[in-house]
Amino acid sequence: MIKNNFTYFIFAIIFIFIGCSSKKYFQPTQIESTIKFKNKLNAPIKTSNRFGAVLKNGSVITENGVSYIKIDKNSSFLNETQDYYIITQKCNQIELIDKKNQESIVIPIDECALSASIKDNKLVAILADNSANIYDIKTKKILFSQKGTPSIAINSLVSAPIFLDTLIVFPTLDGRLLVVDAKSFSVLRNIIINSEKFFNNVIYLMVDGENMFAATPKRIVSIVSGREFSYDADIRDILYDKNYLYVLTLQGQIIQLDKTLRETNKVKLPFATLNAIVIMDDKLYTIEKRGYLIELDTKNFSYKVIVIKGSFGKKKLDKINFYDKNRIYYDQYYIDFTKE
């Protein structure tokens, strides 16, 4: 019996060794140049989401750069609007910090808030129990609540609800778009994007005029002039820019789709693990986990591979990153493409 157990142990070790040794990584055939993440934050990134990142010292980065607010270890940053910073505290309240006078409004909640938005006097939020809620900011009372199917595991890129004239669109944790009338609070439509059991939350939601684009980690849906289109992929991230959707996949692909989700361009970087999307001057920038910056021409889809150098050197990039329209942040460093 002992001999058999020992034999199984040896086979297990060999299996693990073979599995690890056979794992393949992105190996560029040509290196164009080097680049340095020369800008430094006052602390490393601790957590991040679609709309911001919190540093280990409590400072908050939004799409506008480092903000003036600091939050404690029991709080999480949710979003930024024109008038407010939205944070959640200890999973039992949402705090709205007025940008003009720094005064705060505290609204009690029943579960941890994962995403939120504000328009006029309404706060809309998605909670951890997959509730889509609407609150009156002045009275702090709940105006609408609908709970969807609980989600055991979700992707960290949780999208936030958006306002469309007289409508509110909630990106749920179970792969749906819940469309609610902003005045009567009646449910007008339930759009199912995907029905996977795990990691099926809506990770992207964007509106451009009369067109709406949404995605889960497995499927993209676009609604264009009332017509609905879909596209399936293993999605790592997605960004809409100048009438096109740009998709990073788990297989190392960068795909360009038009509004009807027709492929217009595609390139594959074998075994690449891609993170972040910044598009500027017809160039798409993304980082590869082994220490590279990929610069892709969005017109002809030719690309350059650039070695990232800096205080952290060229190595596996496995720490937390965040990006906005102009910058990619990694750990305690960032690159600003408006200055390159």
Image (spheres, helix red, strand yellow):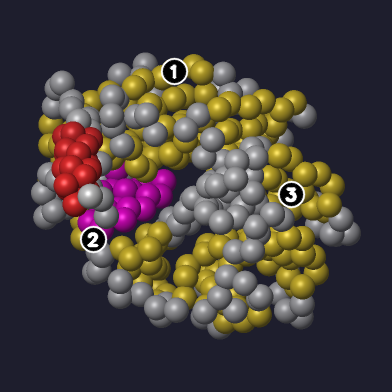
Residue 9, given in percent of the width and then of the height, sits at 20, 46
In the rendered image of this protein, does residue 286 appear above or below residue 312? above
Most foreground residue, 107 or 319: 319
Residue 331 drawn in magenta: yes
Q: CA distance from mark 2 to mark 3?
A: 37 Å
Q: Amino acid at mark 2?
A: Gln
Secondary structure mainly formed by the magenta segment: strand
Residue 27, given in percent of the width and then of the height, sits at 18, 27
Of pointers 2 and 1, the one earlier in the residue sequence: 1
In the rendered image of this protein, does residue 207 appear above or below residue 264? below
Q: CA distance from mark 3 to mark 1?
A: 31 Å
Screen quadrant of the C terminus: top left
Residue of label 1: 265
Q: Magenta part of the protein: which range?
A: 320-337
Count the labels in the image: 3
Residue of label 2: 332
Residue at 36%, 20% (x, y): give it.
Answer: 267
Residue of label 3: 178
Q: Amino acid at mark 1?
A: Asn
Which label lies toward us, 2 or 3?
3
Q: Quadrant of residue 41?
A: bottom left
Q: Residues within 10 Å of mark 2 (few under 14, many from 20)?
A: many
Q: Secondary structure at mark 1?
A: strand
In the rendered image of this protein, does residue 108 appear above or below residue 186? below
Q: Secondary structure at mark 2?
A: loop
Residue 119, given in percent of the width and then of the height, sits at 69, 62
Residue at 88%, 59% (x, y): give it.
Answer: 184
Residue at 54%, 35% (x, y): give it.
Answer: 218
Residue 314 drawn in magenta: no
Residue at 33%, 65% (x, y): give it.
Answer: 46
Can I make out residue 291 in this image?
A: no
Q: Amino acid at mark 3?
A: Leu
